[in-house]
Amino acid sequence: MVANLGKDPPAARKGARRLPRRESALVWWALFAAIAGVALWLQSWRVALLGLLTWCLYQFVLVPTLCRVLKREGYPCAERVRGRLFACGPAHQQLKNDALWRLIGLRNPFQKGDEDDDDPETGGVVHSPDVRGRLTPADRVLILLAGLGTVATLIGMIYGFR
């Protein structure tokens, strides 16, 4: 055991900022359940499509999640973000954009020049941008499901105009 010699506590504790609490995911799922209940009660497929579109919007831009882009050291970024399409900063957003384009089988046409991948200490590449920007399987599945749900909603809206 090390005695405290009158030094201040580590900076991580002393000046650490507390992040504001986010709403519970249960609030969103209660909203989705309420929309589903109203759709069943009214027997309206249009209200069900509205619920599906709301869920897709939630998955794309509102769900509280983590950045999860691999850092140069090899571990995922743990910064909090909103939405599965977004990252914590411009460099990580570029990697995530590239991964989203790869998800649909295309190269990013808006890709900026390759960022410097050298490790500042050793001068060697730790992870390539393709590896660092890889989406987790859960994110990949939910983004694809939300995309299919959006397409189904658009088709249903066009069908509803008839």
Image: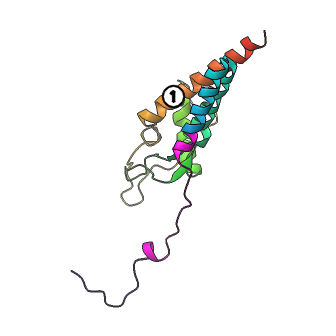
Residue projecting furthest to the right? 161
Residue reaching furthest to the front: 41
Q: Is residue 68 above or below residue 40?
A: below
Quarter that holds the N terminus? bottom left
> What sort of colour scheme is used for the picture?
rainbow
Q: Residue at x 57, y 22 (%)?
A: 148
Residue toward you, 31 or 109 = 31
Residue 78: x %, y % from top left: 45, 53
Q: Amino acid at mark 1?
A: Leu
Dot 1: few (<14), some (14–19), or many (≥20) neighbours within 10 Å?
some
Question: x, y percentage for residue 19?
Answer: 54, 62
Q: Is residue 150 visible?
A: yes
Q: Which of the 4 quarters of the picture holds residue 59?
A: top right
Residue 62: % across, % down = 60, 42
Does 19 appear in magenta? yes
* Residue 132 highlighted magenta (yes or no): no
Element type at marker 1?
A: helix
Q: Which residues are magenta?
A: 11-28
- For residue 140, above or below residue 156: below
On screen, residue 63 above or below 46: below
Residue sitting farthest toward the left: 1
Residue visible at 56% across and 38% down?
30
Q: Position of residue 136 (x, y in %)?
A: 43, 37
Q: Nearer the viewer, residue 111 or 69?
A: 69
Q: Is residue 112 visible?
A: no
Residue wearing tag 1: 103
Left-right relation of 123 to 109: left
Q: Residue at x 50, y 54 (%)?
A: 79
Toward the bottom, the furthest residue is 6
Which residue: 55% across, 49% down? 81
**Label tally:** 1
Which image quadrant: the C terminus?
A: top right
